[in-house]
Image: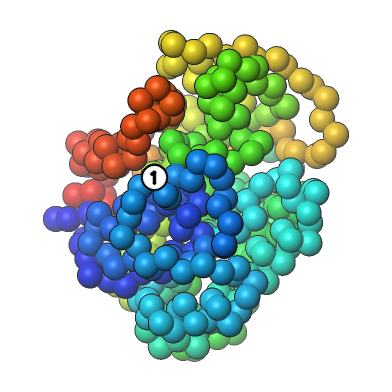
Amino acid sequence: MRQFNNIYECKKVLVTGHTGFKGSWLTLWLEQLGANVCGFSRYEPVSEPLHFALLETNVSDFRGDVREYDKLFYTIRISKPEIVFHLAAQPLVRKSYSNPLETFSTNVLGTANLLEACRTTSSVKAVVVITTDKVYENREWPWGYRETDTLGGHDPYAASKACAEIVATSFRNSFYEKENLLLATCRAGNVIGGGDWAADRIVPDMVRAAAVGKTTVIRMPHAVRPWEHVLEPLAGYLLVGQRLLEGKSEFAQAWNFGPDHEGIVTVEQLAEYAKTHWNALTFDLQRSETQKLHETSHLSLDCSKAKRQLGWSPVWSLEETVKHTIDWYREYYENKNVMTREQLVQFVEDAKVRQVVWAN
């Protein structure tokens, strides 16, 4: 049996935010699955270098802002997707403090625009909206948040993503259920992996600094986060999409995708793990406890629902996740070699060996 029951072969798929970190990995995987992929992303590069540009995919590349309804609707009408993965967003917590209006308008209005354009396009059968693990009202619990826990958000980013979840639920209840259109939302933990050069993220900050012999300053060394390789939640998104394309309406709901318990560690621990895998370069970590902007100290997800009902489970351990991530960056900086395709193949092979449901 092929991956995801071969559901994506020859399917028309739209990915918003396809030039971003997660979007570029997802676009490549969909192409490997035989899908006809169309992408919609903002005009300016999200980072430099740009992972999407390094991949040289055959995606149909549309540019625009998700806040521009007419351009978004035109793209959907022209590309006629059967399923849409909505990843386009303002994804940075600290940037949300400096530009809250952009964050709310992109993440809330942009999501509403996407859902409205999809429901007025007859080709669309399923929509998967990607939010974040930060949609929950964080009470600094030591246990993981479940999909039924209260939504909330202290910072503008978290609040905007919680709003996006509410918008999605409203569209599902008000329109989609009546129009036989299936909609799910997915909430992932802190993802790492090659090709991410976003600002204020621990691994990109470390590899950028290491490449030029500079020091990385850790803002919140004792903050606990659920770390997983980018391919782990993408497998979850694709698995949810498979169920929706199969017409299984019971899967049109919210889903958590995060690591097992051993992947929930502090920022400092993750940095130390990373340090052990790049022998040619060392990270001189300076601990900074000065924190002017609020960020949560402890966050983890309960993914038992996805494991039980979807059959999803993580493939790589934290050690494997960090190794593959640092290998990717080391190979890029030392040899200008992009290991994305190679690591995707390895991930799928490991999933088959470990008898993960979507791979067999």
Which residue is depicted at the point 71% across and 53% down? 157
Quadrant of the drawing holding the N terminus: bottom left
Number of labels in the image equals 1
Q: Position of residue 278 (x, y in %)?
A: 44, 16
What is the crowding at mark 1: few (fewer than 14 residues within 10 Å), some, or many (at least 20)? few
Percent across and percent down for residue 184 are 48, 67
- Reading the image, the residue beneath label 1 is 54
What's the residue at 59%, 41% (across, down)?
198
Q: Secondary structure at mark 1?
A: helix
Q: Amino acid at mark 1?
A: Leu
Compared across the picture, whether 244 is left or right of 264 comes to: left
Residue 222 appears in the rendering: no
Q: Is 40 on the left or on the right of 81, as rendered?
A: right
Q: Position of residue 297 (x, y in %)?
A: 72, 33
Kindly indicate the quadrant of the structure image that contains residue 13: bottom left
Examine the rendered structure and indicate whether residue 251 appears above or below residue 122.
above
Q: Nearer the viewer, residue 65 or 85?
A: 65
Residue displayed at 43% across by 36% down: 194
Q: Residue furthest right?
A: 292
In the picture, residue 148 is in which quadrant?
Answer: bottom right
Is residue 103 among what the camera can see? Answer: yes
Is 161 located above or below residue 315 in the figure?
Answer: below
Q: Nearer the viewer, residue 30 or 339?
A: 339
Q: Residue at x 43, y 11 (%)?
A: 279
